[in-house]
Amino acid sequence: MESDNIKELVEKYFEATTTVAEEDTLRAYFSKGGVTPELEQYVPMFQYFSNAKEEKFTKQVPLDTIASVTKRRFNYKWLSVAAVGLLMFGIYFGKSYQEKREAEYAYQETKKAMTLLAQNFNRGTEKVAYLNQFEETKQKVYNK
Amino acid sequence: MQQSEFLNVVMPFKDKLYRLAKRLLVSTEEAEDATQEILLKLWNKNASFEKYKNVEAFAMTMTKNFCLDRLKSKQAGNLKLVHSNYQEKGSLLQKQIEAKDSVSWVERIMEELPEQQKMVLQLRDVEEYDYDEIAEMLDMQPTAVRVALSRARKTVREKLTQKHSYGIG
């Protein structure tokens, strides 16, 4: 009677239509011993599943590492804040330095332009000096 | 969340994570490393812990993804090497005893299954999760879970009967 029921469950089991509770029944049946010869071939399977459940994770999780990891993360946070601060500082002062250099450059350029202008101006005045000659000659003519 | 609280949440299912990792990675050391990695990752996610309604399922999914990545990565080559070393380490006598022991055959057979079927079989028959939970963990449709499970169970049965009829395979 019981084995008929179990046989049915085994059929369902291989079609994957059993519930967890039914599978529990199966596991209990196969681990108990006294299995019908027909069903004996399934014993190792269920036995293995029961055995596999016993395996434990024995390795200790290094809690120190956990702590230090979180500690380091905390530091990184403040480090990034400091880095941003430094960056803004750098940009601000870097910009004023850049402005100073630009002003210097503009000053030099203007100076150069002015010198050029002055030179040309002088040349112009030299040419105007010839006009004096004309004046002198004119005076000579009037005085005669 | 404090360390002790975290451990209270994690402790009940850390063995399950380890067993799933071992099912996929085979080697004990690899599985231990993987489990440790997952636990550390979980701890780092700490702040967003409450967001996940089911931490256990989330951790299982993480383990699955981590192990599959691991298998795909270049290190997978080393992994196989580790595994073959591990097999050869056993003495001849031990091997003979193991060969007689059909229970260990099931483990070997399970190693040969495709990853998805391996995981489904592990989660259902060893860890006894519901189909819906498995579907959530593995990101599959519940019907697909059933199909994979049925296929995996039938494959195990088939191979097991083969081994039996051939004697020591």
Image (cartoon, rainbow, N blue to C red):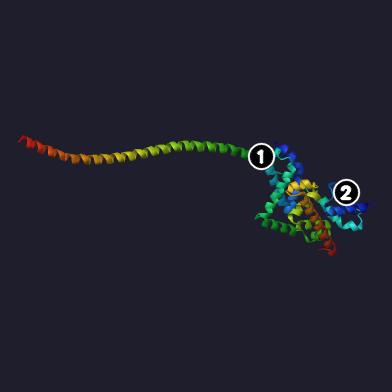
Q: Is residue A58 visible?
A: no
Q: Secondary structure at mark 2?
A: helix
- Looking at the picture, does residue A97 appear above or below residue A52? above
Out of B144 and A52, give the one closest to the viewer. Answer: B144
Q: Nearer the viewer, mark 1 or mark 2?
A: 2
Q: CA distance from mark 1 to mark 2?
A: 45 Å
A117 on left or right of B147: left
B163 on left or right of B32: right
Q: What chain letter is assigned to the residue under label 2? A: A
Q: Amino acid at mark 1?
A: Ala
Percent position of residue B142, x then y: 77, 49
A137 on left or right of A82: left
Q: What chain letter is assigned to the residue under label 1? A: A
Residue position for label 1: A67
Q: Secondary structure at mark 1?
A: helix
Residue lying furthest bottom in this view? Answer: B166
Labels 1, 2: one chain: yes
User: Which badge, 1 or 2, comes first in the chain's sequence?
Assistant: 2
Q: Are marks 1 and 2 in contact (CB under 8 Å)?
A: no
Residue position for label 2: A25
Mark 2 crowd level (few <14, some 14–19, many ≥20, 10 Å Cα): some
Quarter holding residue A109: top left
Total of numbered circles in the picture? 2
Residue lying furthest right in this view? Answer: A1
